[in-house]
Image (cartoon, grey):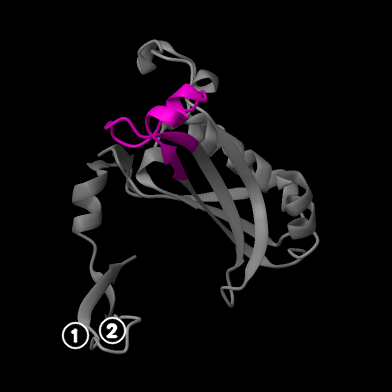
């Protein structure tokens, strides 16, 4: 189903600037009964069992239109205790999903003018950057305070560098509740950095 949907998405992206957003979700199916049916743990403990879903969607960067599914992976954590993560190759970890989606986006969306894959801090792993396909740019929420090289040739820590950037813009956002009986929240100032 995912590959069929991805082929339909591929037909819509030609010549467009594409943003691919990806993230994982837990499909909680229950406790003891789900365990008895072979479903592994999800969540942060507590005995909840189910499946995991990692999905990636393609959006048009110009107007935000949803163009379709790029990839979807579903798996079950039913293998019991695994070896420590530092002693396993990336291909043997759940984190391979970030690399897999990026490679899939590169192949499926190759007719796009540009492809930018956006992901959460869980994808801030070296292999994600090192194996990035040439036709894909990455925007990753930083998890690690890496050393970066500046244009001057000097080095800086990422978080301190970003904190030192000037404010690029300021705008207000008003959050509304769906229920008519409740009023909207007050506007909150938001700042963005380059």
Q: Nearer the viewer, residue 179 or 7?
A: 179
Q: Is residue 123 above or below residue 55?
A: above
**Could you say where residue 78 lies in the image, as x and y percent from the top left?**
48, 21
Q: Is residue 92 above or below residue 98?
A: above
Residue 34 visible, this orientation? yes
Proximity of marks 2 and 1: CB atoms separated by less than 8 Å: yes
Q: Is residue 178 magenta?
A: no
Residue 135 visible, this orientation? no
Q: Is residue 194 above or below residue 63?
A: above
- Residue at the disc numbered 1: 186
- The residue lying furthest to the front in this view is 33
- Residue range of the region highlighted in magenta in the rendering: 25-51
Q: Secondary structure at mark 1?
A: loop
Quarter-wise, where is residue 149 in the image?
Answer: top left
Residue under the image location 52 percent in, 18 percent down: 92
Q: Secondary structure at mark 2?
A: loop
Quarter-wise, where is residue 73 in the image?
Answer: top right
**Could you say where residue 40 lies in the image, as x and y percent from the top left?**
45, 26
Residue under the image location 24 percent in, 62 percent down: 165
Quadrant that contains the C terminus: bottom left
**Could you say where residue 132 lies in the image, as x and y percent from the top left?**
57, 38
Q: Nearer the viewer, residue 191 or 85?
A: 85
Residue 71's mark?
Answer: none
Q: Nearer the viewer, residue 125 or 150?
A: 125
- Residue at the disc numbered 2: 174
State left or right for residue 13 relative to residue 117: right
**CA separation in Å, label 2 and label 1:** 6 Å
Quarter-wise, where is residue 157 in the image?
Answer: top left
Near mark 2 (Cα within 10 A), the count class, few <14, some 14-19 or many ≥20, is few
Residue under the image location 74 percent in, 59 percent down: 9
Q: Is residue 37 magenta?
A: yes
């Amino acid at each position: 189903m995912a590959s069929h949907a991805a082929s339909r998405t591929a037909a819509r992206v030609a010549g467009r600037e594409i943003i691919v957003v990806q993230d994982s979700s837990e499909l909680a199916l229950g406790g003891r009964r789900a365990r008895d049916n072979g479903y592994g743990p999800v969540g942060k403990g507590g005995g909840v069992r189910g499946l995991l879903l990692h999905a990636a969607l393609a959006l048009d960067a110009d107007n935000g239109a949803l163009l379709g599914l790029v990839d979807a992976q579903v798996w079950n954590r039913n293998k019991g205790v695994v070896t420590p993560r530092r002693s396993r190759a990336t291909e043997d970890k759940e984190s391979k999903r970030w690399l897999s989606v990026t490679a899939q986006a590169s192949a499926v969306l190759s007719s796009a003018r540009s492809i930018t894959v956006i992901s959460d801090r869980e994808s801030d792993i070296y292999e994600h950057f090192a194996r990035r396909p040439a036709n894909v740019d990455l925007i990753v929420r930083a998890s690690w305070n890496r050393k970066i090289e500046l244009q001057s040739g000097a080095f800086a820590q990422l978080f301190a560098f970003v904190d030192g950037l000037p404010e690029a813009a300021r705008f207000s956002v008003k959050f509304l509740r769906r229920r008519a009986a409740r009023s909207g929240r007050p506007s909150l100032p938001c700042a963005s950095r380059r």
